[in-house]
Amino acid sequence: MNTLTPTPTFLSDDFLLQTETARRLYHDYARSMPIIDYHCHLPPDQIAQDRQFDTITQLWLYGDHYKWRAMRTHGIDERYCTGDASDWEKFEKWAETVPYTLRNPLYHWTHLELRNPFGMAEVLSPATARDTYDRCNEQLPQLSTRQLLTHFDVRVVCTTDDPLDSLEYHRAIAQSRFDVKILPTFRPDKAMAVDDPRAFRAYVQKLSALSNRDIRTLADYLDALKARHDYFAHMGCRLSDHGLEYIDAVAYTENEVQTIFNTLTQTEQPLSPDEMARFRSFMLVQFAEWDHEKGWTQQFHLGALRNNNRRRLRELGPDTGWDSIGDFQQAASLSRFLGGLDDRNKLAKTILYNLNPADNEVIATMIGNFNDGSVRGKVQFGSGWWFLDQKDGMEKQINALSNMGLLSAFVGMLTDSRSFLSYSRHEYFRRILCNIFGNDVENGELPADIDWIGQIVQDICYRNAERYFGF
């Protein structure tokens, strides 16, 4: 007679925690730690206005290209993703899709987000859709944007902002004495996006108007951008961010870059690939040196191949679900860039995020080249990002960092999200982290010093980031 092992309950309190040690580490050490969300795309205007959502669809599905990709793959018409369907119809179609997302991280995230903060224990499906929709909507008056941040015990949020942003909403939030710090991040991608000369010229004109100065030369351009960098610092900014296929690090002279700038702003002549690379290389160094002067942390999100579906890009615009993992060469140019800054003692604290998992060990070993003892974990291998922001991706990032560097110095998880419900991803990360440590202890690979390992876990969940960024 066969005796069946009892099947674990889905999404129990011990979800993803396979050993007793893992359970102790999570429940006694990780679970109650606050959150520092040092990179996200939350809209600051909604925090300033303490937005109330009319429906769970507005809070949960609007702007979520992860869910849209799954719905399209399941055969759901675009009307129910980004189109004019009602909020109920969009939710209903998502509920129809969810049972078919088994083994996709969306299945876990969906049910974690329904459980916390809504307390919904049922699996989402067409059969439970209407009840789930109604019960979640009933709770929304108590779940404004600020109430959600407080509920998840978020201490700091760093939004992602263009240098031309007024930061008026960050100012309003600061003046309102909201307990959660909402700080800007300097993201100057458009300031060196010279692959589209017309858009670049328009950007220069906007910068000129905002700065109330003529921009005729490269020096004028840098002065205006530096003024915006200074303004961001005045508004509490502590980080910059760059979203790049790879880091350009080719040789240039300032005279060459001045000529390239003149070509961009004074002619209709397109740049050659070499000219674009030289301009981007120059600008990256300028931004990096400014970051170093201010003691900021520079972030580089590397490896996305964006806007692959040109037809859908024309119809719906960017950031609607048409991006994927690229296979760009990263190591040599990254080494030149970091090494050049380090040679001049101008390398800021740095976090490197790779989108291609093939680059895990590349990044994990690269950071060790420039950790010079001046700051603990000065150069970081960032958490699994975007398509790697899931169980397998997180485990591989943690293991690569453990094997090649010091996991104990890691600044931990971030949401990288546009949704106020995405703080469940911190819970997800913490469970995965504790499970890895727990398995190592129970396999005899680490000593059973639960209190010491628990302190390391708490550092990774919160304290390392608190010390590293100096918020």
Image (spheres, rainbow, N blue to C red):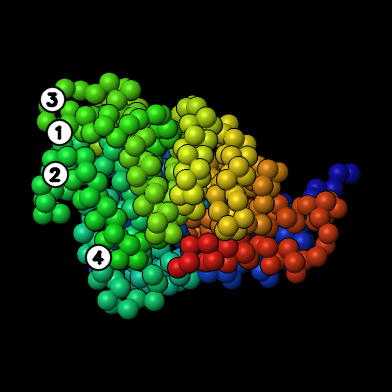
Residue 2 in picture, x, y percent from top left: 86, 44
Residue density around tag 3, few if under 14, some if 14–19, many if 20 or more, within 10 Å: few
Mark in the foreground, 4 or 2 = 2
Residue in view at x 33 percent, y 22 percent: 274
Mark toward the start of the polypeptide (1 vs 2): 2
Q: Which mark is residue 268?
A: 3
Which three-letter amino acid code belongs to the residue tagged 4?
A: Tyr
Q: Quadrant of the C terminus?
A: bottom left
CA gap, disc 4 and disc 3: 37 Å
Residue 280 in picture, x, y percent from top left: 33, 34
Which residue position holds label 2?
Answer: 215
Residue in view at x 34 percent, y 37 percent: 282
Asked which secondary structure carries label 2, the reply is loop
Q: Are marks 1 and 4 in contact (CB under 8 Å)?
A: no
Residue density around tag 4, few if under 14, some if 14–19, many if 20 or more, within 10 Å: some
Residue density around tag 2, few if under 14, some if 14–19, many if 20 or more, within 10 Å: some
Mark toward the start of the polypeptide (4 vs 2): 4
Q: Which mark is residue 265?
A: 1
Which three-letter amino acid code belongs to the residue tagged 3?
A: Glu
Mark in the foreground, 3 or 2 = 2
Residue 370 in picture, x, y percent from top left: 57, 45
Q: Are marks 4 and 3 in contact (CB under 8 Å)?
A: no
Which three-letter amino acid code belongs to the residue tagged 2?
A: Ile
CA gap, disc 1 and disc 3: 8 Å
Which residue position holds label 4?
Answer: 169
Q: Is residue 301 visible?
A: yes
Residue 285 in picture, x, y percent from top left: 38, 42
Which three-letter amino acid code belongs to the residue tagged 1?
A: Thr
Of the pair 241 and 64, the residue shown nearer to us: 241
CA gap, disc 3 and disc 2: 17 Å
Q: Are marks 1 and 3 in contact (CB under 8 Å)?
A: no
Q: Is residue 45 visible?
A: no
